Image: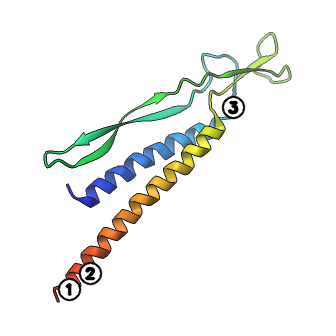
Amino acid sequence: MNVFDISGRAMSAQLTRMNTTASNLANARTTYSSEAEAYRALKPVFRTTMEENGLATVDVEQVVQSDTQPTRRYDPNNPIADNEGYVWEAGVDEAAELIDMMETARQYQNNVQVLQTAKSLILDTVRMGK
């Protein structure tokens, strides 16, 4: 395990986080005929993994549904509305998802910078040996 492995695993975890956020935003304004079938936001659960050499990295343990509940909205003209004229909107907090997306992108960018710095230091070391 080296700096490239650690950053690569962190980038992979952030990619999973970005994909779930994108899925949540894609489904944010969809409507459903019942609460049971309404979309609920997905969230990755991360786990710290300790290696034998004492280094720590991150893995995605699982992806779970969030506890954000779908909302009931009166829309009698919607073809999937129930007998009372209500539809269910996906359980997604769009503002929280956008914040999560910006944070995820920033963390991914930080890991890219770590890789670029490590590469630069290795190349400088090789040049010093010539």
Q: Which mark is residue 89?
A: none
The vertical placement of 94 against 65, above or below, is: below
Residue ID for mark 1: 128
CA neighbours of label 1 inside 10 A, class few (<14), some (14 to 19), many (20+): few
Residue ID for mark 2: 124
Image-quadrant location for residue 48: top left
Decide if residue 110 is on the left or right side of residue 30. left
User: Most extreme residue toward the left, as rendered?
Assistant: 52
Q: Quadrant of the C terminus?
A: bottom left
Which is closer to the viewer, label 2 or label 3? 2
Q: Quadrant of the N terminus?
A: bottom left
Q: Tell me residue 19's x, y (percent).
A: 50, 44
Three-letter amino acid code at the position of disc 1 = Met
Decide if residue 50 is on the left or right side of residue 44. left
Q: Residue at x 82, y 22 (%)?
A: 75
Q: Earlier in the sequence, mark 1 or mark 3?
A: 3
In the image, 71 versus 95, the foreground residue is: 95
Q: Tell me residue 65's x, y (percent).
A: 50, 27
Residue ID for mark 3: 30
Q: Residue at x 23, y 85 (%)?
A: 127
| Secondary structure state at the residue bearing disc 2 | helix
Task: Work out how far the residue at label 1 is from the one at label 2, CA to CA, in angstroms.
Answer: 6 Å
Task: Work out how far the residue at label 2 is from the one at label 3, CA to CA, in angstroms.
Answer: 53 Å
Image-quadrant location for residue 83: top right
Q: Residue at x 62, y 31 (%)?
A: 92
Whether pointer 1 and pointer 2 mark residues with C-beta atoms closer than 8 Å, the reply is: yes
User: Most extreme residue toward the top, as rendered?
Assistant: 83
Three-letter amino acid code at the position of disc 2 = Asp
